[in-house]
Amino acid sequence: MQPQAIAISGRAGGSGAMMRLAWLAVLTAAVVLMQAAAALAKPESLAPLAERVSPAVVNITTSTVVEGRTGPQGIVPEGSPFEDFFREFQDRNGNGTRPRRSSALGSGFVISEDGFIVTNNHVIDGADEIEIEFFPGDGQPKELLPAEVIGTDPNTDIALLKVKAPAPLKFVKFGDSDTARVGDWVVAMGNPLGQGFSLSAGIVSARNRELSGSYDDYIQTDAAINRGNSGGPLFNMDGDVVGVNTAILSPNGGSIGIGFSMASNVVVKVVEQLKQYGETRRGWLGVKIQDVDSDLAEAMGLERARGALVTDVPNGPAKDAGVLAGDVIVSFDGVDVKDTRGLVRQVGNAEVGKTVRVVVYREGKTETLRVTLGRREDAERGPSSESGSGDAPGSTEKELLGLSVGVLTDQMRAELNVAEDVQGLAILSVDETSEAWEKGLRAGDVITEAGQQKVAAISDLEARVSEAEEAGRKSLLLLVRRGGEPRFVALNLAE
């Protein structure tokens, strides 16, 4: 009955209905084609991907000779009345002081046909022998191959190994980790818990995670990663390595779906340097820095919190170029500086010996300085000395900004381990209800600058407070040292 009703509804109505049906057919066909295309783009099985990349994934076995134990550790508690008995038993059986060999397992992946292999530094750290086992497949070595260490980088936990194979090896290439999006599918492969080659799948859970290092840039994933997976690759769906599986967050040592892989864009730079030099060569600016929060930005007259605030400038490239404590580095080598972490990575990735433009915010305006970068590894081997000048005046006390301060005396210098050439005011006590206490200031800290000017007397600090109030500032910027380490703190003038 319904088709007849449509047919007798008139010429115009019938034509319109036919057109609607035609458009509906076209849309239906389009949807079917899109679903088919999506199915082709994302296969239901990961088997083709696994078959393609697995020949380049390796198991790594390390062994280390450790000194024999001097007592029955691990058998009875130290100090137990049975300790002498078990020590005598070990000695009688020759296990007391005899060296023994300890082994460990990890993962890695081949990045070139001539045998370069990437893994974690902690997988091979301290190993006397390293052996590589390849995934069984056509053309792959059947026996274990010994590997030599080309170079390591503890800062990113990356190591580069090399094996001599009888034939060209199958290898995988690095992808661009910056293109990995939260929600993208990824695959982890390795040797979890010594069970041999194993694959797990998940998604990118988060990006740009920081764990503990200055150069950290981790991809977080819920793909199962366990002990033994360390050093193995994290693949995207194109079969490119976007991360090196490094760590897990777990209360029990097993995977709970929070794993971390060092981003490939960090690893690539490290591997290139290890291959070329056998070590890393990172740029060095030569400053101590801290983040700029909203209080610091307001106190310094910045329109918003950005950049990296320089707390100290020891001898080095930055000092030679005229960078001063209190400067805010807002641009490095043509790239805006978001925070201290960003600056550390930018400088570390820069070429040693390169002259770069550094834009600093100083006293309400920006200045561009040219800095020739040094090498961080050289600087870390020999720490630079700091300098200062002036003598500390008399020993008056004053309460300001929730602080009780006094001029440094010889007795204070000795107690606080403060160098003779450091000028400033010692914090004698802090009101525990004050903002100063909330921001971490404590008795024994030394204020060396206020309002980005040196202070050597109580009157200097009082003058800086008055100047800030007259300028309409809500807070005052202090440079405070504790144990020789400097940091800036902005205190509200309403205190």
Image (cartoon, helix red, strand yellow):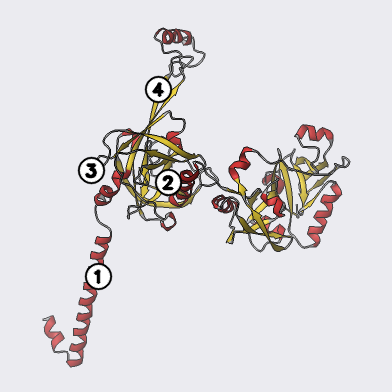
Question: Which of pointers 1 and 4 indicates the residue nearer the eye?
Answer: 4
**Contact check, label 1 and label 3, Cβ < 8 Å:** no
Work out whether mark 4 precedes mark 3 in sequence or the reverse, and give the earlier one: 4
Q: Separation of disc 3 and disc 2 at Cα?
A: 29 Å
User: Measuring 38% from the left and 56% from the top, which residue is drawn there?
Assistant: 183
Amino acid at the residue labelled 1: Val
Q: Separation of disc 2 and disc 1 at Cα?
A: 37 Å
Label 4 secondary element = strand
Q: Which residue is mark 3?
A: 138
Q: Which residue is mark 2?
A: 261
User: Measuring 81% from the left and 48% from the top, which residue is drawn there?
Assistant: 455
Work out whether mark 2 precedes mark 4 in sequence or the reverse, and give the earlier one: 4
Amino acid at the residue labelled 4: Arg
Work out whether mark 2 precedes mark 1 in sequence or the reverse, and give the earlier one: 1
Amino acid at the residue labelled 3: Asp
Quadrant for residue 469, please give it. bottom right
**As displayed, is residue 182 above or below residue 83?**
below
Q: Is residue 230 visible?
A: no
**Residue positioned most to the front:** 166
Front residue (pair 143, 324): 143
Front residue (pair 358, 213): 358
